[in-house]
Structures are given as C-alpha cells and as structure tokens.
Amino acid sequence: MGRRRGLGGRWRWATSTAVAALVALPVTTGGHASATPAPGSVYAALGDSYTSGPFIPVQEQPYGCLRSDHNYPNLVAAAIGARLTDLSCAGATTDDLTSSQGVTPGPANPPQLTALSSATQIVTLGIGGNDIHFSTIAESCFSPTPTGQPCQDKYGNGGTSPDTIDQWIAAAAPKIDNALSLIHSKSPNAHVYLVGYPAIFPEQPLVAGAPEGCWPTLPVAPADVPYLRAKEKELNAMLAGQAALAADSTFTTFVDTYTPSVGHDACEPPVIRWVEPAVPASPAAPVHPNLFGMQGMAAAVEAAIGAA
C-alpha cells in the first residue's frame, strides 16, 4: 500500500475534497490472429482507474481496485461477444503490470499481465497517468482562488523546456514501450489497443472572452487550464508515439479517446460530460469518467477493433 491514487486512482480534487467458448481465429502472416474478432474471442483488459471505473455501479472485487462491471472493457466485451478478464485497478502504474498491487479493501490485485495467455486475442491497455505522478500534479494545481498560475509556477521551470511534467512524460515512454513488449511476448496472437485519456478541460472558454476552464467546479486557475490541457495532450501523444514505435506495431493500435470527448469535458453539464468535475453529480470518482464517458471510450475502442 502507501501509494497515492492518481489519474488512474482517486484524484483529490476537493473544494476547501466496462461468453462464450473460445473460437479459434484464422491465422495471418506473422502468426497473428485475424484482427476481426469472432464471438468468444479472448480479451484481457489492463489499466488504471480510467479503465476500472471508480464508483460506477456495480463495483466488483477486489473493491479496493474500484472496478466497475460497466467500465469500457465490460461494455466492449458485451458488444463484440468477447470473453473478458479485467485486471484493471485504480492507482495502477506500469509497475503493477508485473507486480501485485495492494489495495484496501483487498485482496491484492495480481500482476495485471497474469490476465494474458497465448490464447489472448484482444488486449486493451489504459495506463500512464500515474507514471507521470498525476495525483501530485492534481493536488499541486488545485487553486483556492481563480487567480495566478500555481501549476505553472511549480512545474513550469520558469518557462524553460522541457519542464518537470515534460520530463515525467519522457521518463514514462520507455515504461510504456516495455509494457507493450511484455504483452506481445505473453500474448503473441493478440492485437493490443493502447487507450488514451479523454478530455478533462474544455478546448476553449465556454463563452467567448470568458476565463478558461470552470473554476470552482473544476478548481484550476484559468491561467493554468491551457497548460494542463497541453500536458494531457502531450501524454496522449507520447502514448500514440509508443504504439507507433512498438516492435510489433502492426498489431498495436493507439485508441484516441480525446478527440471524441471534446465537448464532453468536466466543465460541461451532467449527461453531456464524460468526466466528472471536483464534486461528481453522477456515480464516478472526481475528475474521472462517468458512465457516459465509459460508453464513449467503449465506442472508440470498438471502432478501433473494427478498423484493425
């Protein structure tokens, strides 16, 4: 234990606080199964809490992983008729792919790569936010007032480049590369879908000329919103780059969940937004996908699977 929960866990934004028997698929060149899954395909889901779905009903054991039976892996599996093993867990980093993750309440979540076998045909991986210390970033970038730029003051290195968050993203890149290599080693017949993060902040002020963001609903000073929005895009760009550079890149696809989520950020009203603000109005963790977000992310994954 002792690990903070971050972008893949419980962000501490406070205000003063996703069935049938295995069906063998035809084999294509390189020994890989056909990209079009047949009913009964074996699917493994790995990732952090943007995959697990904290507080979205119904939560499954171990309850400390905050894993929902309506997260995007479950929705995708139901849509394509796949047999799902979901070991996603709140707070997970790439280290938890190969190591047991202690959670409270337990039991501990096993190393997530144990979900894989030579029979696995589909893998989704949604991870990286906790590797760049997003829990710490979130807490540091909380502002009790809509003034100043506390986030940039802490991480911006006086405007020099790369700043601290850029360095953390760069340091996470080889970890993602290693994760993809390990997955392909354990499941050589699988197509891996590396799933990005949906939009947290609006792309522009909600009203022309208004301040950026939606302080205090999402308690980030307006001057810091463009900075944090850019850092999330940099994280997604790093993930996309690692998918493209993967040794088995023909069978590795980056799933862009950011683009379809634009206009569904945490500043939008309930029902429209995919990500909840600091005080959720839907069953979800603060600054995490709600059920609508999981449905939108599932649609992006399903489209990627269909296009592969």
Image (cartoon, rainbow, N blue to C red):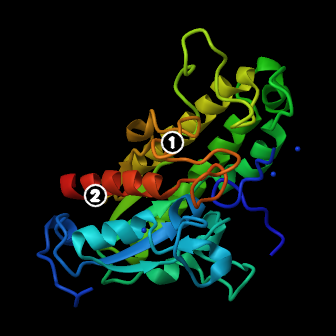
Q: Where does the image place residue 102, in percent across and percent down from the top left?
A: 73, 80
Give the quarter of the figure containing the C terminus: bottom left
Q: Which mark is residue 119?
A: none
Q: Amino acid at mark 2?
A: Glu
**Nearer to the camera, 64 or 172:** 64
**Label 2: few (<14), some (14–19) or many (≥20) C-alpha neighbours in 10 Å:** many
Q: Residues within 10 Å of mark 1 (few under 14, many from 20)?
A: many
Quarter-of-image position of residue 85: bottom left
Q: Is residue 125 visible?
A: yes
- Residue 225 vertical placement versus 305 (above, below): above
Identify the residue shown where x is 64% and y is 44%: 277
Q: Secondary structure at mark 2?
A: helix
- Secondary structure under tag 1 reads helix
Position in image of residue 292 (x %, y %): 44, 53
Lower position in the chain sequence, tag 2 or tag 1: 1
**To which residue does mark 1 refer?**
236
Kind of residue at disc 1: Asn
> Which of the two marks, 2 or 1, is nearer to us in this view?
2
Which residue is at 20% across, 57% downward? 306
Q: Residue at x 46, y 66 (%)?
A: 71
Is 190 placed above or below 180 here? below
Residue topped by disc 2: 302
Task: State the count of labels.
Answer: 2
Residue 133 makes an appearance in the image = no
**The N terminus - image quarter:** bottom right
145 sits left or right of 119 in the view: right
